[in-house]
Amino acid sequence: MNQKIFLACWFIFIILILLSGIKVIFNLLLLFFPGLRYFLLRSQASTLPTTELSRVHRQCSYGDHTLLMFIARNLDASQFETLLTLASDRLSLRHGLNEDYPALVIPSHIKKASEGENGGFEGFQNVRSRKTQEISLAYNFGKPAPAF
């Protein structure tokens, strides 16, 4: 009986060693090949524009990517994409790239409408929703996020 238990434990440990080795090799591949990190981000945020995702990817280290993957596991896909959009906007503002990327550029027909030329959109400031702006403000100023 003891031999059978020992044999079962031995097989379980061998399987755990193999799975752990595969995970370590996968993490080493992610560490040395940043392109794989981009594909993992793309799989988590499939509808996010490429410019925003690549902006976040270029600025992320391996540790940042690992943290983003932990966050992606615990968030809904749309919430994760909103988080990446906010991070992309913040990175573009930090580096002064807000006119080169479509995340912050307001289309010309919306600018005209907001200036009152076509009417109907008086006071329209940004293409993001009010909810996203409130989350962004809470994130930027350290205030707790508003209750929805």
Image: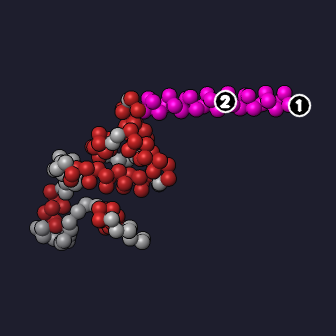
Q: Earlier in the sequence, mark 1 or mark 2?
A: 1
SS class, disc 2:
helix
Q: Amino acid at mark 2?
A: Ile
> Image point 45% across, 51% down: which residue?
71
| Count of residue discs | 2
Q: Residue 113: image x %, image y %?
A: 16, 65
Q: Nearer the viewer, residue 11 or 51?
A: 11
Q: Residue 10: image x %, image y %?
A: 73, 28
Residue identified by numbered label 1:
1
Q: Quadrant of the C terminus?
A: bottom left
Q: Which residues are magenta?
A: 1-30
Classed neighbour count for the residue bearing mark 2: other residues with Cα under 10 Å, few (<14), some (14–19), many (≥20): few
Q: Is residue 78 magenta?
A: no
Residue 10 against residue 75 in the figure, above or below: above
> Image point 42% across, 33% down: which residue?
30
> Image point 15% across, 61% down: which residue?
111
Residue identified by numbered label 2:
15
Q: Quadrant of the N terminus?
A: top right
**15 left or right of 113 in image:** right
**45 left or right of 117 in image:** right
Residue 132 against residue 99 in the figure, above or below: below
SS class, disc 1:
loop
Q: Is residue 50 visible?
A: no
Residue 22 against residue 92 in the figure, above or below: above
